[in-house]
Structures are given as structure tokens and as C-alpha cells.
Image (cartoon, grey):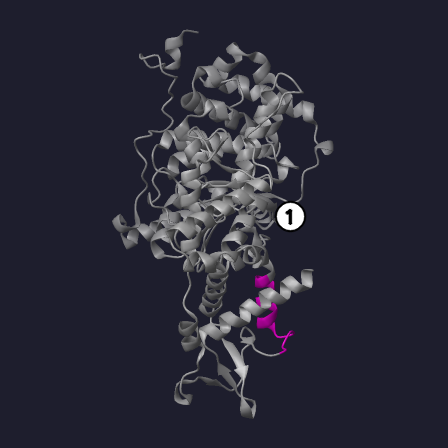
Amino acid sequence: MTMNSWNIEQSGSPACFRLFNPADRSIPSSSSRSKEEEKDVDVLLTQGMTRLTFEELQQEQEDLHGVSATISEEKVEVQVLLDTLDEHLNGMKMGTAFAFAESLNRDFCQNYDFRMMFLRANRYDPKVAAKQIIKFLDIKLELFGLEKLTEEITLKDLTLEDKQDLLAGSMQLLPFTDRAGRRIVLEVPGLRTGKSLRSELRARIYFSMNAIKSLAIPSRGIVFINYLQGQYPDKLKGAGFVENMKVGLSMPYHIAGFHICVDDAISVAIGKAAIAITPDKFRSKIKIHHGSPVECQYLLSTYGIPPETLRLTADNDLILDDHLSWYQHCLQQESIVESSSPLQDQNTNEPNKNDVVFIGKRTKGNGNERLRGLAARYSGPYSAGGPKERRELVDSMIAEIKRGGGRFLKLDSSCASWEEVPISEIREKITQMFRNLRRPSGSQQRAAIHPGPVSERIIVNEPCENDILFGRQPSHIGNQRLKELVEAMALEYDSSNRGRKKKLADSLVKDIKGTGARFLKQVNGGHWEVVSDVAAGIKIATHFRNHRRCQK
């Protein structure tokens, strides 16, 4: 077989099968689609569902809701399946990357674990598994070239741009499972860098293959959540979705469900257009949830995905601590594998629990929490001091962190290891922390708390079950739901400074009122009065304090 038969570019660059065109990143936008086309999409989705048999549709729906039976490998004739898979591959491989991979490294293609990955992903259907192997290697060849076709992709194989796409957080393996014990992948198109589709796809392959290693029972699969809420709309308007979908469907994991969370009509239209290009069998597993972040979390819970799964603040900000810990774990594991001596220091720059880590997003950890605590403690003297006093105060905080064994670290330019932050940059970041601590004055808060005239007050005869009632009303449904929300957010609230705590409480008030619920206190005559937002925020802050006391 000659090299030319593999469509190698004349420049000597990696082989390109042109499964997709990286220059074409678009799907039809909602603004360019007529109402008739929107109806056509709905018809297409319905037709795709009707093309499935009753048994297939039932299986997909059980999968989506997490109630499908797990296939025991002990009851499967594995060797028969492997032999059948081999027959299908021999019939399909002509002119594909698989045939070339076989000529380069037959052991790789015959590897038991490699083949079982694809069988498990496709519920032990050897024909479908063979097709996916062919597709996977074709795409891997196009994106990584001949030299990596039969090798595992590691962080060292990624370019700086690839790593930036990986670190951005547009793909996150959450540390939680759904109620069926399946791992969850959070996709946030709003965090895509948009620099290069090729880099985005290469990062997706590395991320996906790494995620597969975390599956305790691979045949259960992975649940995907595509999050387009609030400040995270897809700024690329669906561009690159087709290519990402092709790469995703070639990965050897079982897709158990795909949830799209949106809060505007444009995102719904883009979601429908994207669904229309997916295979029939996959469409039945896609659900679009339209509503506020709180509403979408409730809808996800009906599919066995707990609300606390999404690491969000009350302002709908994503907390990326777990994602960055995952990236650090990948660095550490690859460093251990490559180490030539077991006595060699594996990673001298790996952050310890006392280090302060600067990564551009809110980060938890002993060092970061200690620094925030120091800033909160010294906020008064800092505000009252002059430039010299402020500088000395900042330097004393830096010294206190270092006395406790902590360092100030950030990822280096290659995103491959940690490096210490220059003293000038540390000072600037701490100064910014003090700026963020500023909050309204006491007089402004008192003015907000003071009730308005009686004529402006809203009197309610009978509270609804979702309302939050002041006083001792622990059995009321609305109060029970507030208690659950407080428990879910307690860790973030307790680790925040005063200004941040107020923002969290105010945002929670806004979210609760967005569902139609009210905050009520009882007045003379047995009636109820709607309280101000400030009073509601104070009540929520009290709930957080009471929860903290109960944990001690």
C-alpha cells in the first residue's frame, strides 16, 4: 500500500480524510430560518422517533431516565463477539485508517481492551462497534497524523492552543454521578475559545478518551449536559457543532442522555437545528430544557440528575475548581507514568493544600480560603489606611501565607506545570480582592430595610405552598425547599467574604421570586405581608448561619 493511497498532503503534513471541513463551522442560525423551516425541523425529529422500533425506543427512553438494565459481561460470550467484530472489520477496512493502523502496529488493533471499549459503548453490537472503530481511527488520523494513529494521546501531544481549549472549561467531567451511578459531562459552549476548530476537536478527543478511564461500569455510559444559560450562550451560534458531534459520536463511550439547558428562544432554535442533523437513534435521547437556571435544574432532577451536580453560584457563575483539579490530576498521572525512577520527585511544582492558586476563576482550597479570610479581616484597616499602610498590610498578608508553608502559583505559558507568581502580580491581585470587598454603607442598608407606607405594602390572605414563611414554619413546603437550597450552597457561602455572601443571598432571593414564590411574614389579624428583598436576604443569611452552627 503506497502513501499516496492515504491522501497525504503534498506538504508532508498528516493525512486528511476530509471527514469534515474545519473552515465550515456553521449550522443554520435561527435568524435565517423561516417558520416553515422550524416546523420542518419538528417534523424531522418526530419522523426520526417513528423510524425506531418500539423495543429500540423503549430502550433509549429507559437509558435516558437511568432505569435501563446493565448488561453483565459474564452473560455475554465475549470471544464470539470479538470474532464477529473481527469479521466485520475485515469487511470494512479497505481504504480506511484501520487498515493502515494494522500495517503499522497490529498489536494495537488486536488489543483486547481497545476492542472491548467499542463493544461496551455499543451494547455489545459487533457490527456497530466495527463501524465506530473505523470512524474513530479515520478522525484520529486526520487530527493527529500518522505518528499518533496507534498511540495513546497525551497532554504532550497537544499544542498550547489545544490545552487552552481544554482548560477553558467548555468540556468538564463532573465529580458527581446521576442517581443511576453514571458519570456526567458538562458542556458549556459559552466557554469555547473560538480560536481554532481543529484545536477544539483535538482537545475533545483527549478529554473523551480520558473520561472513559473514569467509568466504573463502561456499559452504563455517560450523561451529557449542554449548558447555555444566562451569561453562557454559545457566542459562536452553533458553529462547529456538526464537527464536534461527528467526533463525539466516534468516541467509544455509550451516550446515555443529552440534555440542552437554554433560557432564550434563539438557543432553542439552534438546539433544534443541531438535533436535526443527528442520527435517529440518538435524537430520542436529546432533551431541550427551556427556563431559568433553577427551573432547568429542577427539570434535570426529573431525569435523575441532582440539582447540586451543576457547580453554580447564586449568580449563575460556574465554579471551575473541579475542572482544574481534573486537569492537574491528568498532569500528575502522566508525570508518574513517564518517571524513570520511583524515587524521583514526581512534580515539585504541584500545588499543596496551603498554596494560593491564581487561575483567573474563583478557586477553593485552604490557601485561597485563608487569603480571603485575611482580606476580610483587614478590610477595615486597608480602607482607612494610606498608600504606605496599604502596601505594608498587603506585604504582611503575603508573609503570613508563606509562613504557613504556602506559595502563590499559576499555570505556566504552556499550561503544563505550575510556576510561582511574581511579587508585583501578587500585590495587584490582593489589592483587587480588597476592591471587591467594598459594599453599600450602613445608612444605605438601613434605608433599604425600612418598610414603606402601609398603602404600599402587599397583604396576602393565604400563603401558597411555595412561599417562604417567616417565623417557625419548618414543615411548610417552601421553607423545606429553601433549606435544601441553603444546604446545597452552604460550602460556597461559608468560604466567601462578606460582600460575596450578600450577593449570594440576594441572588437566591431573586431566583426564588423568579419561580413565583414570595417571602411572607404574619401580621395582625392572621394575614400575611410580602416583605422587602432586603428582609428576605437577611432571612436567607440567617439560614446559612444556622446551618453552619448545626454542622459544628
Residue span colored magenta: 472-486
Q: Could you tell me residue 375's position as x and y percent?
A: 49, 53
Q: Nearer the viewer, residue 168 or 335?
A: 335
Label 1's element?
loop
Image vertical order of residue 80 relative to residue 405, above or below: above
Q: Nearer the viewer, residue 172 or 49?
A: 172
Q: Quadrant of residue 263?
A: bottom left
**Residue at 33% over, 53% down:** 266
Question: What amino acid type is highlighted by mark number 1?
Answer: Ala
Q: Quadrant of residue 331?
A: top right
Q: Residues within 10 Å of mark 1 (few under 14, many from 20)?
A: some
Q: Which quadrant would the N terminus be assigned to in this image?
A: top left
- Magenta segment: does it hold 477? yes
- Magenta segment: does it hold 300? no
**Residue at 54% over, 53% down:** 373
Which residue is at the far right?
Answer: 74
- Is residue 243 found left or right of 410 in the rendered image? left
Q: Could you tell me residue 169's position as x and y percent?
A: 46, 41
Q: Nearer the viewer, residue 381 or 494?
A: 381
Label 1: which residue? 180
Q: Could you tell me residue 251's position as x and y percent?
A: 51, 31
Is residue 256 visible to the viewer in this orientation of the structure?
no
Image vertical order of residue 348 relative to residue 425, above or below: above
Is residue 414 visible to the viewer in this orientation of the structure?
yes
Image vertical order of residue 183 relative to residue 148, above or below: below
**Residue at 39% over, 30% down:** 161
Q: Could you tell me residue 297's position as x and y percent?
A: 52, 57
**Residue at 52% over, 57% down:** 377
Which residue is at the far front?
Answer: 388
Q: Which quadrant would the C terminus be assigned to in this image?
A: bottom right
